[in-house]
Image (cartoon, rainbow, N blue to C red):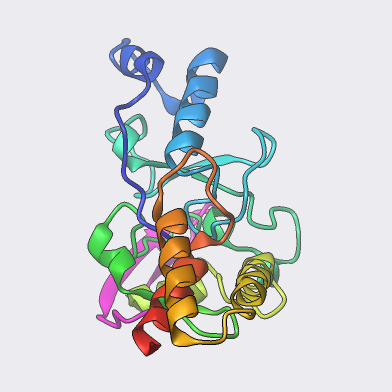
């Protein structure tokens, strides 16, 4: 995950929200199309949770970060673009919103401090240094009640299932990391390494319309190597 800075909401959504009895499920096709485009552009065409590339509208789900209510279902700040997360596949391999469902999570890509606590390891696993316990309670899609305690670190593993051993998110992060390590390999001395890493840090820190898939682990690795020099 990386920090997502929200931009102004799309004009069509703003107009639609003030219509009488406006509801998310009844949204006109042109409003939803502009909404998808706006979310994808501000996220660099990456899933808000796992950072895999979202190619087109067949790959995207519009996620309500806080479970949908009549009060928040059209609030732009509550909306994210996410991948389909193994939808229709084995339950154990599902991730992102497809895994999360209505379960509250306490790690938010719209919160900069939450994202500053994200770190990775060389195996490609993603973690949060925040292990604060929070109580959660919700009803799932079939009305079953759930409650318990969780933490941002636990939400990454359980709520979003981002570290499933053979899942697409961890394999994608591993591949992105190995690819970058190969680029770094020719630079042997400290000076050339630092010049290269600082250049790459500038490249990967830019918030562009099309971000590099799994860019979060690359940013982490660059900073880690710079700290070691």
The residue nearer to you, when weighing 40 against 188, is: 188
Q: How many marks?
A: 0
- Is 172 rendered above or below residue 9? below
The image quadrant where one finds the C terminus is bottom left
* Residue 31 visible here: yes
Residue at the image point whose x is 61% and y is 77% from the top: 181
Q: Where is residue 157 shown, x and y percent of the image?
A: 50, 76
- Is 216 rendered above or below residue 226? above
Magenta stretch bounds? 127-148
Query: On the image, which quarter does residue 102 sit in?
Result: bottom left
Is residue 170 within the magenta segment? no
Q: Is residue 169 left or right of residue 219?
A: right
Residue at the image point whose x is 32% and y is 81% from the top: 129
Q: Is residue 9 left or right of residue 121?
A: left
Q: Where is residue 228 shown, x and y percent of the image?
A: 39, 89
Point out the residue furthest to the right here: 89
Is residue 128 within the magenta segment? yes
The image quadrant where one finds the N terminus is bottom left
* Residue 148 visible here: no
Residue at the image point whose x is 49% and y is 21% from the top: 34
Query: On the image, which quarter does residue 93 sit in?
Result: bottom right
- Is 15 rendered above or below residue 69? above
- Is 154 rendered above or below residue 30? below
Residue at the image point whose x is 37% and y is 64% from the top: 105
The residue nearer to you, when weighing 221 against 79, is: 221
Q: Where is residue 200 shown, x and y percent of the image?
A: 48, 63
Query: On the image, which quarter does residue 78 sit in?
Result: top left
Q: Is residue 125 left or right of residue 165?
A: left
Q: Is residue 146 left or right of residue 162?
A: left
């Amino acid at each position: 995950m990386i920090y997502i800075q929200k931009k102004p909401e799309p004009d069509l959504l703003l107009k639609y929200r003030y219509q009488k009895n406006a509801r998310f499920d009844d949204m006109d096709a042109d409003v939803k199309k502009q909404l998808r485009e706006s979310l994808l552009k501000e996220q660099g065409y990456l899933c808000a949770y796992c950072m895999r590339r979202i190619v087109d509208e067949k790959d995207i789900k519009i996620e309500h970060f806080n479970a949908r209510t009549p009060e928040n279902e059209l609030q732009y700040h509550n909306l994210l673009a996410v991948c389909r997360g193994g939808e229709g596949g084995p339950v154990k391999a599902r991730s992102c919103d497809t895994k999360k469902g209505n379960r509250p999570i306490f790690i938010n890509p719209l919160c900069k401090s939450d994202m500053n606590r994200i770190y990775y390891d060389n195996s490609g696993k993603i973690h949060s240094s925040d292990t604060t316990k929070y109580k959660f309670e919700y009803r799932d899609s079939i009305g079953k009640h759930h409650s318990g305690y969780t933490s941002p670190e636990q939400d990454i593993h359980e709520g979003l299932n981002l570290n499933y051993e053979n899942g697409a998110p961890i394999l994608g992060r591993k591949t992105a990391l190995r690819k970058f390590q190969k680029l770094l390999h020719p630079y042997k001395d400290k000076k050339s390494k630092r010049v290269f890493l600082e250049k790459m840090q500038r490249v990967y820190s830019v918030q562009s319309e099309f971000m590099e898939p799994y860019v979060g682990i690359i940013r982490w690795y660059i900073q880690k190597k710079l700290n070691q020099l």
